[in-house]
């Protein structure tokens, strides 16, 4: 069983720049649902990513993802178009540099859903970013959620659970994740993250 760990950072000198919030957590923990709620509540805009994975039914090209071929993705790597990129279960994902930098320079809030390895890269580039890691109530509950959503075969679920344990261990040792919250109840999870973000200067987020 995991427990809540929500830390409010010390307020520093106000900045005219925007705030980058990066959110990580194991596959199946509910990151996308949480991020969608946060984007509306804050409000915040999603960082645009390029990916080689096939689009899902709910995806719209250019909204959160640009769907590209592997050759196009590697060409963008050569052009240094990404803040970070990685290969996750056979598909490439990369956060596009220019839209994020332009939004932050304009003082806007940007939300990034990313794995822990990408989170480490983002924290190195943006040390003032707000890192959030979402935990499952337990590994048994995470397995249940992965099974219920019906996307993966049993062997893939087993791989995802193994990776989840590694991600959780990494996040607990990586101090850029200053907020770690258990997603047992969506409303409470969103409230906890909003409270965390409100500790940063000039966010305009009320408690």
Image (cartoon, rainbow, N blue to C red):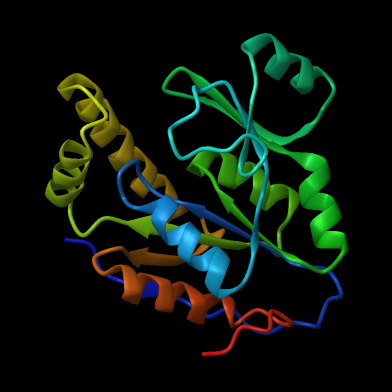
Corner quadrant of residue 148? top left
The x, y position of residue 175, in whole percent, is 53, 59
* Residue at screen point 44% across, 57% down: 133
Q: Position of residue 91 (x, y in %)?
A: 50, 21
| Residue 187 or residue 86, whichever sits in front | 187
Q: Position of residue 13 (x, y in %)?
A: 80, 83
Q: Is residue 32 left or right of residue 144?
A: right
Q: Which of the pair 64/145 is nearer the observer?
A: 64
Task: Please give left or right for residue 125 compared with residue 115 in the image.
Answer: right
Instruction: Judge by depth and name the residue closer to the eye, 188 or 148.
Output: 148
Question: Which residue is at a point 63% across and 34% down the rendered structure image?
Answer: 61
Q: Position of residue 12 (x, y in %)?
A: 74, 82
Q: Is residue 177 left or right of residue 70?
A: left
- Which of the pair 7/135 is nearer the observer? 135
In the displayed orientation, state which residue is furthest to the bottom: 207
Residue 127: quadrant of the picture: bottom right
Quadrant assignment for the N terminus: bottom left
Q: Is residue 59 above or below residue 139?
A: above
- Count of labels in the image: 0
Give the vertical position of 105 relative to 56 (above or below).
Answer: below
Q: Is residue 203 above or below residue 183?
A: below
- The quadrant in which residue 129 appears is bottom right
Residue 185 lies left or right of residue 100; in this view the side is left
């Amino acid at each position: 069983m995991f427990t809540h760990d929500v830390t409010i950072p010390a307020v520093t000198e106000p900045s005219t720049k925007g705030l980058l919030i990066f959110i990580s957590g194991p596959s199946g923990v509910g990151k996308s649902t949480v991020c969608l709620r946060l984007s509306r509540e804050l409000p915040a805009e999603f960082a645009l990513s390029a990916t080689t994975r096939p689009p899902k039914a709910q995806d719209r090209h250019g909204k959160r993802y640009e769907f590209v071929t592997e050759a196009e993705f590697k060409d963008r790597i050569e052009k240094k178009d990404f803040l970070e990129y990685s290969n996750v279960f056979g598909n490439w994902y990369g956060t596009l540099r220019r839209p994020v930098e332009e939004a932050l320079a304009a003082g806007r809030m940007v939300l990034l859903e990313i794995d822990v390895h990408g989170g480490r890269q983002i924290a190195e580039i943006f040390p003032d970013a707000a890192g959030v890691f979402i935990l499952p109530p337990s590994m048994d509950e995470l397995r249940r959620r992965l099974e219920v959503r019906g996307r993966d075969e049993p062997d893939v679920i087993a791989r995802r659970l193994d990776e989840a344990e590694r991600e959780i261990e990494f996040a607990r040792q990586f101090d850029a994740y200053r907020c770690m919250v258990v997603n047992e109840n969506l409303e409470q999870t969103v409230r906890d993250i909003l409270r965390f973000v409100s500790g940063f200067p000039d966010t305009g987020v009320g408690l």
